[in-house]
Image (spheres, grey):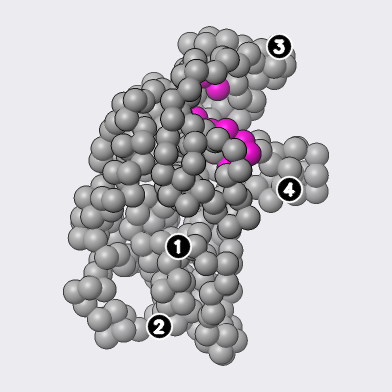
């Protein structure tokens, strides 16, 4: 089968490799759609994200969906022909975190497209059946690939303990910011403001229900906004916006750090955190969110289709990565169709 490897930073190479066979408890999935994630772009451009370093050729891509073409032994709830979305992180299922339900913290988790685990820019993937979720008939492969970033947004909203009376600010209107916006809007009564540098993304936020959108290049956010937000989500992964979070949260508020910055350490105003008695919460991926993502999308509470702005063929994988990297002013989510 064909696979697209990150040979070195800035270079994708197509290779022919052996098609996998499903083991006991696994299904073989023909990959149909893969979303380009910011982490894919980081690896493509820099060859590393924090402690995760690409030391040998790696297949990128972890937002994926496809069709079951073979079923391994002891798989009872999936059959050949089923359309599925793959949750990309496979935990050990045995450790303290797994048994408590927070398997995203498992130290032995194998996450697709995170070194040294290969990802989904490939024709076939063998995957544990219990982390393959059936796609409702009216949802396309492209949309189903975005259950993954939606899971991040849903988990962010859960970490924030959103209440109907909350006033919420989201810093960043990329794919994660917009899925977080939709997750928050599922709680009726919440007032949401969104900040981003690109008008195209702000228009999308407005379309998806943001009450207020602000471009800091056009308006002074410190004059426009006061410290009046119960919840502040940072989804851009920017040192600048991370520092702004504690200043924009009100007393007793919650700050949720969703985005992953390039820097390992960023200084925060600790007096703001102490005097305002803020809860500053990190989050790492998600846990137990895929069933919720499927349900909310199926019932129409979440619109993933509108996030997809560009599509590329399998042969254009590298072009897709470059496009997503270089066109943040005109695209939200780029899909590669295998």
The answer to whether the residues at label 4 and label 2 have Cβ atoms under 8 Å apart is: no
Q: As displayed, is residue 126 above or below residue 302?
A: above
Mark 1 or 4, nearer chain start: 4
Mark 4 and mark 3: Cα distance apart in space: 27 Å
Residue ID at (54%, 18%):
17
Report the Cα–Cα distance between label 3 and label 1. 42 Å
Q: Main secondary structure of the magenta part?
A: loop
> Does label 4 or label 3 sit earlier along the sequence?
3
Provide residue 192's location: percent of width, then percent of height.
Answer: 34, 65
Near mark 3 (Cα within 10 A), the count class, few <14, some 14-19 or many ≥20, is few
Residue at 49% across / 36% down in the picture? 7
Residue at point 34%, 25% (across, down): 315
Q: In the rendered structure, does residue 118 fall within the stretch colored magenta? A: yes
* Residue 45 in the image: above or below residue 94: below
Please state the extent of the stretch shown in magenta in the rendering. Answer: 114-125
Of the numbered discs in the image, which one, if any, rests on residue 237? 1
Q: Secondary structure at mark 1?
A: loop
């Amino acid at each position: 089968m064909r696979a697209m490897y990150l040979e070195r930073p800035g270079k994708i190479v197509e290779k022919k490799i052996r098609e996998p066979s499903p083991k006991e408890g696994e299904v073989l999935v023909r990959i149909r759609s893969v979303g380009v994630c910011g982490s894919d772009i980081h690896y493509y451009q820099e060859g590393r994200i924090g402690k995760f370093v690409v030391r040998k050729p790696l297949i990128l891509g972890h937002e994926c969906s496809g069709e079951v073409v073979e079923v391994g032994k002891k798989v009872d709830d999936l059959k050949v022909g089923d359309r599925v979305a793959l949750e990309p992180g496979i935990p050990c299922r045995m450790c303290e975190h797994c048994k408590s339900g927070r398997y995203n913290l498992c130290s032995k988790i194998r996450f697709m497209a995170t070194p040294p685990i290969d990802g989904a820019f490939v024709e076939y993937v063998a995957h544990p059946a219990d982390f393959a979720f059936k796609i409702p008939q009216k949802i396309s492969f492209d949309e189903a690939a975005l259950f993954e970033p939606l899971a991040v947004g849903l988990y962010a909203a859960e970490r924030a303990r959103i209440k109907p009376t909350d006033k919420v600010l989201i810093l960043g209107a990329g794919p994660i910011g917009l899925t977080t916006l939709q997750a928050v809007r599922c709680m009726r009564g919440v007032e949401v403001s969104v900040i981003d540098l690109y008008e195209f993304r702000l228009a999308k936020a407005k379309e998806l229900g943001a009450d207020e959108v602000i471009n800091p290049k056009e308006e002074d956010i410190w004059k426009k906004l006061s410290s009046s937000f119960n919840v502040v989500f940072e989804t851009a992964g920017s040192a600048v916006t991370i520092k702004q979070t504690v200043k924009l949260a009100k007393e007793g508020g919650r700050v949720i750090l969703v985005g992953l910055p390039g820097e390992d350490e960023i200084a925060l105003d600790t007096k703001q955190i102490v005097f305002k008695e803020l809860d500053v919460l990190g989050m790492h991926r998600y846990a137990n969110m895929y069933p919720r993502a499927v349900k909310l999308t199926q019932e129409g509470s979440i619109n993933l289709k509108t996030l997809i702005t560009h599509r590329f063929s399998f042969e254009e994988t590298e072009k897709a990565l470059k496009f997503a990297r270089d066109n943040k002013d005109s695209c939200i989510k780029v899909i590669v169709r295998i």
